[in-house]
Amino acid sequence: MTKASKRDADRVLIFDTTLRDGEQSPGASMTLEEKLAIAELLDEMGVDIIEAGFPIASEGDFEAVSEIARRARQAVICGLARAQFGDIDRCWEAVRHARRPRIHTFIGTSPLHRAIPKLDQDQMAERIHETVSHARNLCDNVQWSPMDATRTEHDYLCRVVEIAIRAGATTINIPDTVGYTAPRESAALIGMLIERVPGADEVVFATHCHDDLGMATANALAAVEAGARQIECTVNGLGERAGNTALEEVVMALKVRHDIMPFHTGVDTTRLMQASRMVAAASGFPVQFNKAVVGKNAFAHESGIHQDGMLKDSQTFEIMRPEDVGLSESNLVMGKHSGRHALRKKLEALGYELGDNQLRDVFVRFKALADRKKEVYDEDLVALMEVEASSAANERIRVSALRVICGTEGPQTADLTLEIDGEPKSVHATGDGPVDATFNAVKALVPHPEAKLELYQVHAVTEGTDAQATVSVRLAEEGRIAAGQSADTDTVVASAKAYVNALNKLMVRRSKSAPDALSA
Ligand code: KIV
Ligand code: ZN
């Protein structure tokens, strides 16, 4: 029995690491504003612990963890630190502002990982004792992780877990760092540790799974059945390589299958869609259509038999209700005659609470969209809101006007006017296709020769030839990565705006090292 289980045997803590492990996804880096907004939502929706970053990794991470710590209301705020005093001190400096701070320190314990710092088993055991004790002297909430636990010899794993507990760790996390384990083995490992390690009943055991073999959710749930009471996960399963356990999947699995997994979390599931959309927009990683729980098709029914069944009784083909995950019940279509009040109600149903000023701005954009598009669906409004959120901050460049000429006779051309720091600037450019011509025009007006276009993706928001397109763009420049998004009924206009959105974010990152980077 774990400490948590003495208090509430069925309560599973949700530890979200979207802002740390999730952000480690190549290309998923987020701005400070985006991280603050995500952390605020996670806190509001009842996530127990937010791993806000890796404070020693960069100034940006340090700033984000400190600011999230200052603003958090309810959640424990955690920072990651390697098994080094300097890392742990820096982590404490950042999380100490939180009402409920936690230091999370880790070291790789498997034979492969022990070989990297060239520590033998005894030397590593000593390092674990020293660093966990040091962390515990700073903070009374300490989590310790033996990285690559699932490939660590069992006897050695028991030995180091015991050392960490004796040194003061309050949570022991068991990472399946490379997504190697399978459900039965995941359960057996947690069960073995709880049974064999002295002091195991004094700590909470956590499970941290990666999805390399597509088993992260199953492995996490199996670990809970064996006694783990903390699941580490990320929104949309974002994370290194194939990602981490998806928060929305474990939370909904525990809710829907409470009959066979009698555990509960503190998460308000009606905020899951909102969290998914926010993380997708901030990271620039769109959610796959058939993604469990939050995918666009998760509640769509295409075949005649399914549609017929749904009309007679929705339980025929739905094991959870759309509204349980925050999808509005009706897909009432809005149009150019819809008023401000109706828009506010609709946005509230979609999970967006707006102040009067913000509603005024959004209403103007909604009307512009409704003028071009007969029917404005929920998905259109979500795209509009996400673009609004991702473009609100730090916009030095805006797209003012764009005209492209394309067709079978090349070269395609773009006439583009950008407003740069309030000044209109225009250019004519050519390219291999209208999007290429448009991007060349942006490059001519705002030269950024070192930046590489890493990703360009277009998605239709709804069906039909007048559908809005959402465009994601990712730029990489000397290790800095910036993702931009936009939506428009004109794909080329959406592309220009998404590119400029990414460029604005890139400049914010650059400006931390060179204040006047625009002219550089
Ligand atoms: O996957 C992993 O091992 C990690 C640790 C740092 C907990 O993310
Ligand atoms: Zn991980």
Image: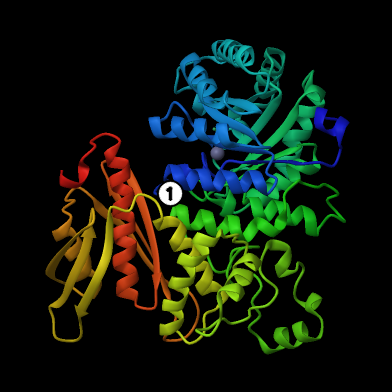
**Residue that appears at 41% across and 69% down:** 487
**Residue that appears at 18% across and 55% down:** 446
**Residue that appears at 68% across and 49% down:** 45
Whether residue 48 sits left or right of residue 383 in the image: it is right
Residue 179 seen by the camera? no
> Residue 296 at what x, y percent from top left?
57, 70
> In the rendered image, which quarter contains the N terminus?
top right
Q: Residues within 10 Å of mark 1 (few under 14, many from 20)?
A: many
Q: Is mark 1 within 8 Å of ligand 2?
A: no
Colour mapping: rainbow
Looking at this view, is 147 or 369 the one in front?
369
The answer to whether 299 is drawn above or below residue 511 in the figure is: below
> Residue 347 at what x, y percent from top left?
59, 68
Residue 349 seen by the camera? yes
Whether residue 385 sits left or right of residue 291 in the image: it is left
- Quarter of the displayed picture in which ligand 2 can be seen: top right
User: Disc count in the image?
Assistant: 1
Residue behind mark 1: 28
Amino acid under label 1? Ala
